[in-house]
């Protein structure tokens, strides 16, 4: 799943305050080290700045709870983790790698499952729920049940650390994300209050053929874990996670991939969010984008102006006839990454081709291909729409965000990789996709530091966000995969990401 992220360094004053506390808490830290610590841990900065307890001891205590190594690699970037780091009562019982389970040598280890099981060993029945609640399978083909899931997520799903924005997945995007080819109704699992039948918790999985380096796993992708706010902190999340594991296991699926903004044992990769303002004024009004010191609104508006027209010759909307060519190009392009899904033609159609039967306002995904003079598809680029609700704002109710999705180009696919040529081509494609984002009235364009994004994010004026996305594998031990950022959480242009997998 995605993580609500905002441009980082939004509050210069907060950071100054946090820096002072850090200085007082840990003698001997240089200014540069303090800045580095806070850059890597935006939520820690917020926590320190906003904490009512102003003593150096409380800041030092917050830090002591973190493992220094994890701080320095930016793992401990969420405020929640500052408090929770190290406990993991539930996750310690699960087949996932543990923190501290460091490699003895720097040599890569053999990758593979952690626990081997057969379907016969798997319980046919769910674990009982506490009194007053019951399990339910949600039929998303039924509009009433789809609406129930939408309502739960709309009111209770992921928010940013300051509770200013909350993801607002449309009913259409939920269908798109949860019903790709091969989807299973049983993997849309909820909990209802027995009396009122109100849906109070949900978790979903979809099938995915996931390649990790040279092995392809018949896995599932778990997403949309959500518990009603009134039922939080009651250890219901582990029950839902165990239940979706059981349901996947019953289908012979023993590995899973999932992503999240919080730190759990143990990320296989960590990417950072980047944001490119389109409607800067609105983003500023709702508190998403800051006004940098020494700047003025009109400078910011000018800085983020987007051209009216695209510039790549042969660029056009993807059509049904392009499916085979796009699938072939995407498959060859994704081969360069350590981790990527494999897509057949049906999956390419589902994930990339806009369904013309949808009303324009229901469009979820936009894909543009480049067709050369010989009618060959040489490139494509796509993005999807995910709105966020603006919580308690007098004027604006939502932010319309485009998320960069998959792309591929022939540049650099044959022969030695020409990074300079690839950089030029990707910049052209992303710049053109920005033109479409503007046309379709998006307020912001979001992207992660994955794939080859490091080659264009800065040039296209994407700024670093305060959110990170951690990638996790369930029941599979894999060597770390580069997330596209360095130890200081800055774009790593030398070592691009090995992640070729996005999650909605
Ligand atoms: C995420 C959410 C379901 C957790 O529920 P909760 O009531 O806070 O937590 P519970 O008391 O039920 O369970 C806590 C356990 O779940 C784990 N957990 C919490 N969030 C998790 C997540 N996103 N993925 C996996 N495990 C998670 C915790 O680490 C803890 O286990 P531990 O003791 O091993 O550390 C709930 O906060 C929520 O609905 N949040 C909004 C939506 C959201 O963030 N979804 C997750 C998207 S990645």
Image: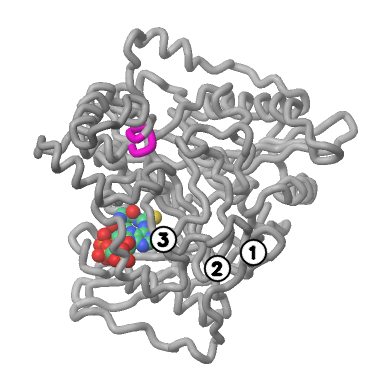
Question: How far is mark 2 from mark 1, CA to CA?
Answer: 14 Å
The secondary structure type at the circle numbered 1 is strand
Determine which residue is flagged by label 2. 476
Answer whether residue 404 is visible to the viewer in this image.
yes
Question: How far is mark 1 from mark 3, CA to CA?
Answer: 27 Å
Determine which residue is flagged by label 3. 99
Q: Nearer the viewer, residue 364 or 26?
A: 26
Question: Measuring 40% from the left and 58% from the top, which residue is drawn there?
Answer: 224
Q: Position of residue 494 (x, y in %)?
A: 63, 34
Answer above or below: position of 34 versus 185.
above
Q: Horizontally, is 193 left or right of 224 in the view?
A: left
Viewer-nearest of labels 2 and 3? 3
Q: Quadrant of residue 404?
A: top right
Viewer-nearest of labels 2 and 1? 2
Question: Measuring 33% from the left and 70% from the top, which residue is drawn there?
Answer: 90
Q: Earlier in the sequence, mark 2 or mark 3?
A: 3
Answer above or below: position of 296 versus 274.
above
- Residue projecting furthest to the front: 28
The secondary structure type at the circle numbered 3 is loop
Answer above or below: position of 7 versus 179.
above
Q: Position of residue 273 (x, y in %)?
A: 46, 38
Please give the range of residues in magenta: 37-41
Question: How far is mark 2 from mark 3, CA to CA?
Answer: 15 Å
Question: Measuring 27% from the left and 69% from the top, which residue is drawn there?
Answer: 236
Q: Quadrant of residue 34?
A: top left
Answer whether residue 151 is visible to the viewer in this image.
no
Cβ of mark 2 under 8 Å from ligand 1: the answer is no
User: Dot 2, crowdedness within 10 Å: few (<14), some or many (≥20)?
Assistant: many
Q: Horizontally, is 58 left or right of 352 in the view?
A: left
Q: How many marks?
A: 3
Determine which residue is flagged by label 1. 209
Q: Earlier in the sequence, mark 2 or mark 1?
A: 1
């Amino acid at each position: 799943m995605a993580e609500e992220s905002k441009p980082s360094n939004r509050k210069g004053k907060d950071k100054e305050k946090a820096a002072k506390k850090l200085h007082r808490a840990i003698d001997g830290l240089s200014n540069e080290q303090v800045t580095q610590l806070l850059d890597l841990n935006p939520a820690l900065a917020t926590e320190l700045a906003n904490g009512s307890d102003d003593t150096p001891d409380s800041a030092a205590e917050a830090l002591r709870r973190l493992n220094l190594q994890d701080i320095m690699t930016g793992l401990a970037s969420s405020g929640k983790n500052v408090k929770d780091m190290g406990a993991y009562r539930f996750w310690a019982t699960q087949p996932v790698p543990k923190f501290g389970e460091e490699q003895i040598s720097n040599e890569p280890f053999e990758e593979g499952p952690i626990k081997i099981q057969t379907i016969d060993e798997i319980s046919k029945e769910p674990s009982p729920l506490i009194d007053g609640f019951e399990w339910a399978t949600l039929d998303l083909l039924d509009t009433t049940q789809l609406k129930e899931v939408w309502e739960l997520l709309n009111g209770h799903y992921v928010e940013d650390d300051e509770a200013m924005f909350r993801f607002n997945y449309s009913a259409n995007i939920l269908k798109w994300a949860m019903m790709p080819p091969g989807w299973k109704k049983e993997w849309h699992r909820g909990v209802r209050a027995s009396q009122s039948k109100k849906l109070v918790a949900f978790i979903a999985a979809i099938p995915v053929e996931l390649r990790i380096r040279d092995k392809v796993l018949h896995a599932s992708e778990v997403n949309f874990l959500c518990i009603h706010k009134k039922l939080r902190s009651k250890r219901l999340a582990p029950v839902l996670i165990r239940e979706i594991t059981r349901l996947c296991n019953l289908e012979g699926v023993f590995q899973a991939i999932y992503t999240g903004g919080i730190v759990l044992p143990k990320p296989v990769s960590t990417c950072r969010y980047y944001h490119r303002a389109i409607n800067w004024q609105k983003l500023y009004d709702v508190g998403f984008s800051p006004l940098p010191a020494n700047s003025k609104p009109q400078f910011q508006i000018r800085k983020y102006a987007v051209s009216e027209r695209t510039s790549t010759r042969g660029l056009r909307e993807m059509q049904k006839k392009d499916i085979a060519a796009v699938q072939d190009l995407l498959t060859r392009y994704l081969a360069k990454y350590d981790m990527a899904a494999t897509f057949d033609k049906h999956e390419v159609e589902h994930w990339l081709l806009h369904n013309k039967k949808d009303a324009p306002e229901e469009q979820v995904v936009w894909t543009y291909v480049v067709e050369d003079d010989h009618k060959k598809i040489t490139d494509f680029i796509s993005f999807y729409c995910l709105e966020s609700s603006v919580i308690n704002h007098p004027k604006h109710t939502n932010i319309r965000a485009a998320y960069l999705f998959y792309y591929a180009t022939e540049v650099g696919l044959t022969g030695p990789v020409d990074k300079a040529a690839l950089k030029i081509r990707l910049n052209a494609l992303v710049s053109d996709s920005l033109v479409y984002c503007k046309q379709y009235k998006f307020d912001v364009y979001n992207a992660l530091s994955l794939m080859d994004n490091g080659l264009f994010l800065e040039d296209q004026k994407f700024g670093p966000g305060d959110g990170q996305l951690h990638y996790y594998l369930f029941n599979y031990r894999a060597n770390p995969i580069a997330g596209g950022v360095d130890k200081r959480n800055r774009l790593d242009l030398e070592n691009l990401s090995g992640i070729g997998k996005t999650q909605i």
